[in-house]
Image: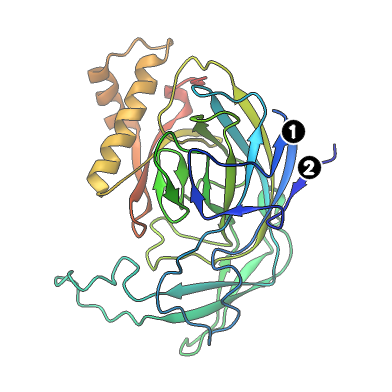
Amino acid sequence: MSRTRITHEDGIIYEFTPHLESVTTVEPGEKLTVETIDSLDGAVQSEGDLLESVPEEVNAATGPIAVAGAEPGDVLAVEIEEIRIAEDRGRVITIDGFGLLDDPDHDEVDVDIEAPRTRMTPVSGSGSGSDSDDSESLVLEWDGLETDLEVPVDPVVGTIGVAPAAESYTTLVPHDHGGNLDTTDVTAGNTVYFPVFQEDAMLAMGDCKAAMADGEMCGTGAEVSTEIDLTLEVVDGPRTSIDRPFVETPGAWKTVASAETLEQACELAHSDLLDLLVADPDHGFDHTDAHMVASLVGGLEISQVVDPLVTVRNAIPKRYLSQPF
């Protein structure tokens, strides 16, 4: 089946607003290929390209893509089938004042982090995404390293979201609409669910990484341009409503939440999971029993700790939670 191709030349956004204008309209079930540019808009091509501060416009998201028939209260399902690296190198950087250890108020941490610094991450081999033969890797041939290092390519979509309910958020900020989630589970083989706040949902995505660890501690992954194969579906009148993004992996369901502090984000992700467990007709939990079960079989995971809001997810194996929708 042919795919509809949507490129960053068709349109990009740097802000998710309630009143986005689409670059195209697709039908539920339509197969797409979405092209994205790197989060720094091509500004960093060598280790001599340094960023003194976070750009005013960063994390360009291709779109918005209108999904015909999506209405507020529905759920948009984004099945990510494959992510292909679209250039021969990535880049990882530090920026003064941005990153986990680059805060002058953290007196208890005595670590010397140089910022700005840029390191390039050339891509070696072929194959990526869900059909990868695992031959593709990033080669770290950095000055000062005793030996070269290889990092497996495992592409992630850093920024992905829909038009928010009322407020506007730049593509640097994660929130209930999605946005800059920087979550390693937003990858090939998984499905990401979003609450629909506005007519036609208005999906946009970008800020992809060839590799990124949970936490994204220095502030970036290996930032790259990509091609993303995906299929969109609309869950009309879902049995269970959601307030924030939700990820399905082959073995688990994961709520995703962002807030000003790690504790607040954990509370949101956990309460969202409890609501799903209580709504599951297979069990008959009340919130207290769901709370206890989640303490036995669930698991909080850090997505990122460097953006204006931090993001966490709460995972539960599928055997304890049936399909919520």
- Residue 91 location, x and y as percent? 55, 73
In this orientation, which residue lies closer to the viewer: 294 or 273? 273
User: Residue at left 26%, top 25%?
Assistant: 291
Look at the image and tell me in which quarter the N terminus lies.
top right
Q: What is the distance, in whole Å, between disc 1 and disc 2 at their CAs?
A: 8 Å
Q: Is residue 126 above or below residue 34?
A: below
Quick check: 301 above or below 292?
below
Label 2 sits on a secondary structure element that is strand
Q: Position of residue 94 (x, y in %)?
A: 41, 75
Amino acid at dot 1:
Glu
Marks 1 and 2 in Cβ contact (< 8 Å): yes
Tag 2 or tag 1, which sits nearer the N-term? 2
Residue 91 visible somewhere in the drawing: yes
Residue 181 makes an appearance in the image: no
Give the residue type at disc 2: Thr
Residue 31 x, y percent position in the rendering: 75, 37
Which of the numbered marks, if any, corresponds to residue 4? 2
In the depicted view, which residue is nearer to us: 217 or 236?
A: 236
